[in-house]
Amino acid sequence: GAYVRPLALVGLRGCLVCANMAFEALGMATKGHMYGATAADESAPLTAESQSARDSRADDAQVERMQAQKRRYSRMQMAVAGFGALAVAGTVALSGSAAGGRVASGGATTLEESARGVPQTPDAQDAGASDNGMIAMDNGMQAETLVPQYKVGDDGLYIPSSDPNATQATRALLTALVDVGNTDSLMFGHENTNIEGQYFWDEYGTLGHSDVTNATGGGFPAVVGYNVEQILYGQNWTQQVREAYARGSVITFFWSASNPVNGGSSLSCKGHPMKNLLPGGTGNGNWTAYLDTIGAFFKELKYEGDHIPVIFRMFHECTGSWYWWGSECAHPSEYIDAWSYTQSYLRDVVGVHNLLYIYAPSKPSDTFIDSFDTWWPGDDKVDIIGWDRYSKETLYPTNVLSDCQNVSTLALKKGKVLALGETGIADGIQGVTNSTWWMHDFVNTFMNDPLCSKISYALTFANESPDRYWVPLKGNPTHPSFVEFYQSDKSIFAGDDRWTTLMRLYAFGPQGNVPDDDVAAAAAADAADDFNGPGMGQDDDVAAAEAAANADDFNGPSMVTDGDDKLAGKAMPPSAFNPPSP
């Protein structure tokens, strides 16, 4: 069926749409230190209240940690069943209306069926909601329509609250995320997915590995996260970012920022850094130097000449006690001033216009007033409303649902995109034995709830080692459920036709400039069930599911193949990724 976009949203673009990874973040680091979902005091036992402290090596120099990590990986036998198809494929032709859906056999969910109706602007009527502003969910319940309150540009795209001069691709991404929020699906994200895994390390972005690929037999996360702090220490994730973007992923960065006063870690509160990073403060010179460097990096992220849009999660988990910008080190007024200053410096001084800012406090159901009143940076400073949550296995579904219901209510009221910036079982999923976890405790928690179904994406932390990971591989207890989650209509991974259609509709990403008469490519995508890789639909590919569950495509630190020449649905041997010139 045709997907009809209200004219107010199409505007001038109708003719175009026709057709901390930080080394400090590495839990495999030496000396027994961990990173991600740990208590700020590593000597204290992990509890549900001790959420993710983002710098586990506070007493060591970051350069030393990098060198130790490199030595750690150099001792590993690194071989991974990497990506089998590197080019974005399986396009779905659009002609005026965006026809299609997932590449699927009979009974597949089309974009029109999945989206239920596009988001409305203040001046446009909702195309899919009922008269009372509700959307019918797959489980028979009614969900309120997310009615965005962003301004609308002449091209019909939403304008980020934080930047009226945001690039076209950045505005297009925001508009597409609104659409996803009005479906019964969420985009799955994974931190450092093409930098590190349970058995691989790819510093230079040349191997094309991802544990999501290894786990599913060809998939890739729809959202990929990185840590911009490492840019300040000589790392350059440009290759990895461009690879992920070329596969159709949304890019997000968090920042485990060093203390600008004394150069200490993100856990160092000495010198009142939140106050002193402001003009006239003792840390202002260092802070602006940080911003100059990371701002230049963001501006250099390009794909086929266009700036890659980035969701920036800075000053995250402010309601926690572990960071120097958090509740035990900073005053809320200082936090708000620092957020505003940092944002305006990147935008107005450095000239960065490809950022969407997500505000993500920690465990907001426990700290709701603090999170969204006392510490709130301002409606004009936040583009995406989010939160971070880690919990023990027994508490996770209850805690994350409570968070989500509270934050969703606010997002609907403010008319902003909702996202789960970072989440998972505290200290990793390796100890979870519930084989239904990904469906029962994770995605159904969100998608079966009328409020939480508004979520656009949820991002898990990195796979740091076989003993500490958030995405399971074959043989891990939660792997069968992860494959089921991957195959489910409730998930969106890179290459899902619903997402690639939105990229075409709004002309951004690797699908943004695909000719609308490429019938052959669309036909090939519709017919192909032999590889569930980038650009392909995911939920109908039975071969991929069987391969992920049964094939010996990845069984540890050495590659094992099962002799299937067709490689149907399997992750294929690694090959270098050669991105287009910027």
Image: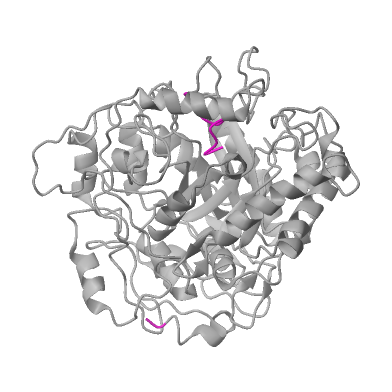
Q: Position of residue 549 (x, y in %)?
A: 23, 36
- The type of colouring in the image is one colour
Percent of width and height locating residue 166: 65, 69
Q: Could you say which quadrant of the image residue 283 lies in? A: top right
Q: Is 174 located above or below residue 473 in the figure?
A: below
Measuring from the top left, give residue 540's x and y in whole percent: 25, 54
| Residue located at (17% from left, 54% from top) | 530
Q: Is residue 349 left or right of residue 517?
A: right
x, y percent for residue 315:
71, 43
In the displayed structure image, the side of residue 332 where residue 434 appears, left or right: left
Residue 356 left/right relative to 375: left
Would you say residue 488 is visible in this rendering?
yes
Q: How many marks?
A: 0
Viewer-proximal residue among 377 and 573: 573
Give 76 or 517, whichever is nearer the viewer. Answer: 76
425 part of magenta stretch: no
Q: Residue at x 20, y 68 (%)?
A: 524
Q: Main secondary structure of the magenta part?
A: loop
Q: Is residue 165 above or below residue 354?
A: below
Residue 140, can we see it?
no
Depth check: give the residue in front, 258 or 454: 258
- Bounds of the magenta span? 18-28
Taking the view exactly as shown, the residue that stands out farthest to the right is 280
Position of 54 relative to 163 (above/below): above
- Image quadrant holding the N terminus, namely bottom left
Residue 17 versus residue 568 in the image, above or below: below
Residue at 26% of width from left, 48% of height from top? Answer: 575
Left or right: where does residue 16 sit relative to residue 307?
left
Please identify the quarter of the rendering in which residue 33 is found. Answer: top right
